[in-house]
Image (tube, coloured by chain):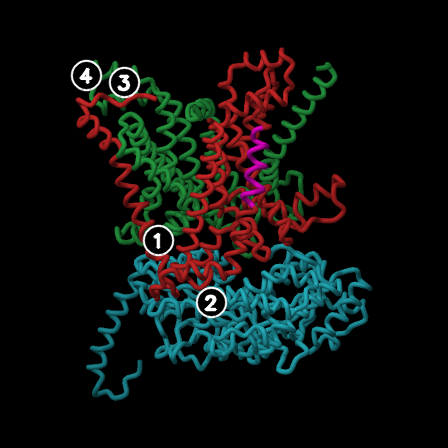
Chain colours: A red, B cyan, C green
Amino acid sequence: MRQASKPSSSRFFDINGWAFVSVAMALISVFMLYPIGKSLWMSVQSGQGTMTKFVGLGNVQRLLDDPMFLRALTNTSIFLVVQVPIMIVLALVMASCLNIPNLKGRGLLRTAVFLPCVTSLVAYSVLFKSMFSYDGVVNSTLMGLGLVSEAVPWLTDPFWARVVVIVAITWRWTGYNMIFYLAAMQNVDKSIYEAARIDGISATRRFLSITIPVLKPVILFTTVTSTIGTLQMFDEAMNITNGGPADSTLTLSLYIYNLSFKYVPNFGYAATVSYVIVVLVAILAFIQFYAAREREQ
Amino acid sequence: MHFAKPTTAVASLALASMGLMTAAAVSAKEVTVWAWDPNFNIAIMKEAAARYTAKHPDATFKIVDMSKADVEQKLQTMLASGVTKSLPDVVLVEDYNAQKYLRSFPGAFEPMSGVVNYAGFAKYKVDLMTIDGKTYGLPFDSGVTGMYYRKDLLAKAGFTDKDMENISWDRYIEIGKKVVATTGKKMLGIDPNDNGLIRVMMQSAGRWYFDKDGKLDIKNNPALKAALETQGKLFKAGIVKPVTNWAEYVGAVNKGDVASITTGVWITGSVKSEKGQSGQWGVAPTPALDIPGAGHASNLGGSSWYVLSGGKEKAQAIDFLNEIYAKDVDFYQSILTARGAVGTLLASRNGKAYAEADPFFGGAQVWQRYSDWLGKIPSVNYGIYTYEGDAAVSAQLPALNQGVPVDQLLDKIQQQLSAQIK
Amino acid sequence: MSQWSGKLRTALVYGFLWLMALLSIFPFVWMLISATNESHDITKGKMSFGNALTENYHKFAELFDVGLVFWNSGKVAILGSFLTLAVSSLAGYGFEIFRSPGRERVYQGVLLSMMIPFSALMIPLFILLASFDMLDTHMAVILPGIASAYMIFYFRQNTKSFPLELRDAARVDGLKEWQIFLFVYLPVMRSTYAAAFIIVFMTIWNSFLWPLIVLQSVELKTITLVLSSLGSSYTPDFGVIMVATILATIPTLVVFFAMQRQFVEGMLGSVK
């Protein structure tokens, strides 16, 4: 831990400290704190459009009876529980594969896998939507390869629609997480691996006992950011399936959007749902940090 | 303007010139219009603007094209935040949403009851844009429904044009089964997650998700029940080709994979885009549900133009809409031929274009038939929660396709909707 | 380890990696192929090159002033990136170098704000900017994102690897704090800035929902708005969409390839 400057110049220290962060703090106050506050205020109101009245905790009560909210919550949870672990594991495996010494074409492979992260969410969503349509490319390829006998109703069946969304997000973000792991792995002293290999420790054990512990802070970082990202997922749900079919891919963020712009606008209730996301994010982030900290001891 | 007596001529002249000057000053600025669909609404609006500009050279128009969802989202954001600066003067609103906007944002839209002669429009259109006696929009296109069918495929299965007139849905299913058996083509395409057809069926019996007072009407709604059952039967009978989106829906027709399509008249342009099928299509009334009160006329979609009270050029906008959309019968002929737009101005139906026989449809007077049905569309109160209603029904469509009894579905729909309309 | 299982393992590794690479690239390839085909061929899943590329481009150019749209996106992205990097790095540096209990709490608050979903802030932000009379401007698109919690976090993490000796030496030389930041910190942290630039540039270039709400005029539209409106018409012309998508993706690709090395180095720094 590095020490702060000496107390004799503490006022100078303090002024400088605040000076550096002042612009950012001012902007955050205006563009983040005010909206958060206003949003909180809105969440205790309810009504159509501009005609609202105070309802206190009425919106929270409504949450519990709202089938669409419960569906959105279930979907978001499913995405979280399924997509994030798959992506993290996949990224770890890819990173360790790419980390193998004397790998031919490493640069090319790494670039290829990272490429999806460059696309805009709208662009790739529209792309995936056209690829997974009933007569689309994916079905014709699968049928051509003989893997399926008839076209898979990707976007019209609730189960498959969720699969498409999970596949899309995994496609888009795995490379991103992989780069973090790769960078961290390349920090690990190769000689440790050599020593372990000479000792006869299997590759899997080497991975689990050496690599993973070193990567723990990165894994934690990516897990937390992925969790936050998935909990807030919007663009894909909107542009690929628009929440359908039958609200099977409706996420909390999309529900908020619908409550504001598609259904009879109830901005107060929408604000309440958004705070549900905040609470979930806080809980999950806390759990993850806690779990990581405990093991360190 | 007519001056009744020469003695008042001077005063009238003075007033008129003042009026002209005001008019000139007003038309020096630009009327902004928001709409979607460059091939239909936008193109039609451009023509209307051109017609108006020909008579009022100082008027200019800025017609902004964006997706329907974008228009709605922007409109809602701006109205909710009370910001009127960036609002357009005229906006296109789908009829299903009319009441929602009018009721959620009182004062946002300009009533035109004193200016526009609403008696000249189809009643069902005027009703949906009226609140407390004031009417707000300018009725535009109709989504009057009909059934287009492939005469050649039906003939192969042994059916003539007469056999398709005024049939029930059960009869339609029987016919469909024969068509599939003899020609191998499906009878129609349906997006399993789209409840457009259900809405068509519901309205054909004069019912909706809500009753005339806007109260929830689900559990004891025989039309909704029959509509859901019918959709279930259509799929069960094996006569449906499932499609994923609009492009596939139209593609099924163009590629010849389906023998019929029952939806709003605005599909005509898409059906006719496959020139190779000319002469092979016929038109018949929408099939009817097998319940009392069910008819052969219904509506799907349709929108109208609304003037925003916060728009800068609202006077000019109202004048424009009134002059072209409420009075220019020739305009309606033009957009019918060019875009397949069936207007709801009753007088337009007497125009030349409406009486034409269309060789694509075997010489049938397609437009005449649609405009006949237009007059028979039952008025329903779409209420303000149509999207929520759709969502509640769509949520149960997979269950419907799996054969869950309709009564159970109705319960679920009722439950979801009552939670949404708080 | 027998040689045979070693070879098998290597084969599996290569096989897996190439499969992943293929799956990652495939949509891009398909995008390129589709851009040369007509819309109805694309929806049928045609996998071969056609010759409709120029036609598709012309249709696109007819609908939109392509140069203007890209100018808009570019202007917003570059300006936004510079401002974001400036403000966020100043803050990240400040939080790390001038630690104090008070500022730590403020920092934790900043981190917490990352958890607020944008959908909760949309409408209040919109009202706020309307009251500043800034709607329908490019600045309105940029402003809310400049003080990015994520970037502040990123710069603070990377500052941990900034050698304090350099700063102490500069102080001894009589440099003021802001001069240290400009003339010592900035050059040393070049790759951090490069990586940050890529991330921020890409984020702003690809941003959709906020510009959608804020921008009204056609002249100000960015490429994502254009893409979305192309894709959500009743009969989307996929050939045009693909051309637009490719054009929209090229700048981010260029930025990425140009700064790849610094990018990886920068991410390395944040991981420590």
For image coordinates 28% across by 41% down, the residue present is: A27
- Label ID, residue B421: 2
Secondary structure at badge 4 equals loop
Q: Are marks 4 and 1 in contact (CB under 8 Å)?
A: no
Instruction: Tell me what residue is drawn at x 25 percent, y 88 percent.
Output: B5
Q: Estimate the x, y position of residue B391 in percent, counting from the top left.
A: 54, 62
The residue indicated by pointer 3 is C167
Secondary structure beneath disc 2? loop
* Residue A13: image location, x then y, percent: 21, 26
Examine the image and state in which quarter residue C81 appears: top left
Which marked residue is nearer to the observer: mark 2 or mark 4? 2
Residue A39, labelled with which disc? 1
Which range of residues does the magenta coloring cover? A79-92
Which badge, 3 or 4, comes first in the chain's sequence? 3
Q: CA distance from mark 3 to mark 4?
A: 11 Å
Q: Rounded to the nearest whole Å, what is the CA distance between mark 2 and mark 4?
A: 68 Å
Identity of the amino acid at label 2?
Answer: Ile
**In this figure, which residue is indicated by the disc labeled 4?**
C174
Q: Mark 1 is on which residue type?
A: Ser
